[in-house]
């Protein structure tokens, strides 16, 4: 069985962590997109009940060269914290856990031929799957950007 993210030994400086910031509408501070993070170093960007999930830039830096991504199955129902795939690198194979419950609506097919997209742009073109949220309230259990960065610093 592959290791969980939080059990990784740090190999990158936490000061180099890059994260995505949420976008806001022009009508005020109501976010149309929310970005949240799990302690397993997975991010989810949510817009209108649809989430885009991948590993954080911090996790990608720790893992180094991604050589293979086992994608979840489209149509699969997943529970928060359930294993949905594997990210393999030259260093390790790491289980990928869903940050929220829902139905897998799509996967990043480009990763099949070019898994290094995760290294090139973990929180952008290297996304892994899209999920329709079952319980939007589960977002409240995840970390916002500042809390995630503090967690990363704590972990050393």
Image: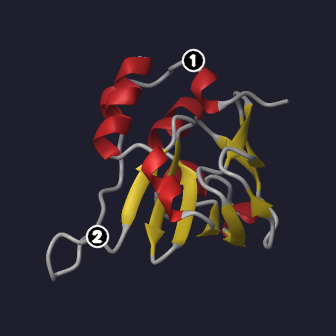
Label 1 CA crowd tier, 10 Å (few <14, some 14–19, many 20+): few
* Camera-side residue of 34 and 95: 34
Which quadrant: the C terminus? top left
Q: Quadrant of residue 113?
A: bottom right
Horizontal and vertical percent position of residue 19: 36, 48
**Mark 2 or mark 1, earlier in chain:** 1
Q: Quadrant of residue 73?
A: bottom right
Disc 2 versus disc 1: nearer the observer: 2
Horizontal and vertical percent position of residue 22: 30, 62
Q: What residue sits 35% from the left and 46% below the top?
A: 144
Hey, which residue is sitting farthest bottom in the picture?
27
- Answer left or right for 77 relative to 19: right
- Is 31 rendered above or below residue 117? below
Judged from the image, the secondary structure of the residue bearing numbered disc 2 is loop
Q: What residue sits 52% from the left and 35% below the top?
A: 39
Q: Residue 31: which disc?
A: 2
* Camera-side residue of 115 and 35: 35
Label 2 CA crowd tier, 10 Å (few <14, some 14–19, many 20+): some
Q: Residue 37: which disc?
A: none
Report whether residue 121 is seen: no
Judged from the image, the secondary structure of the residue bearing numbered disc 1 is loop
- Is 132 rendered above or below residue 68? below
Report whether residue 57 is seen: yes
Q: What residue sits 73% from the left and 27% below the top?
A: 3
Q: Quadrant of residue 13?
A: top left
- Is 112 rendered above or below residue 138? below
* Camera-side residue of 87 and 144: 144
Q: Marks 2/1: CA distance?
A: 35 Å
Which quadrant: the N terminus? top right
* Disc 1 target residue: 9
Horizontal and vertical percent position of residue 143: 41, 43
Horizontal and vertical percent position of residue 63: 60, 33
């Amino acid at each position: 069985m592959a290791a969980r993210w939080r059990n990784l030994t740090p190999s990158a400086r936490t000061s180099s962590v890059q994260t995505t910031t949420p976008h806001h509408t022009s009508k005020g501070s109501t976010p149309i997109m929310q970005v949240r993070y799990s302690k397993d170093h997975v991010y989810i960007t949510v817009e209108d009940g649809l989430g885009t999930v991948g590993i954080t830039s911090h996790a990608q830096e720790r893992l180094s060269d991604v050589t293979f991504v086992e994608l979840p199955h489209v149509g699969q129902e997943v529970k928060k914290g359930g294993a949905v795939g594997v990210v393999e690198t030259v260093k390790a194979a790491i289980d990928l856990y869903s940050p929220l419950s829902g139905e897998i609506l799509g996967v990043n097919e480009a990763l099949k031929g070019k898994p290094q997209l995760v290294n090139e742009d973990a929180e952008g073109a290297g996304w892994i799957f899209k999920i329709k949220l079952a319980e939007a309230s589960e977002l409240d259990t995840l970390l916002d950007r500042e809390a995630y960065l503090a967690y990363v610093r704590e972990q050393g």
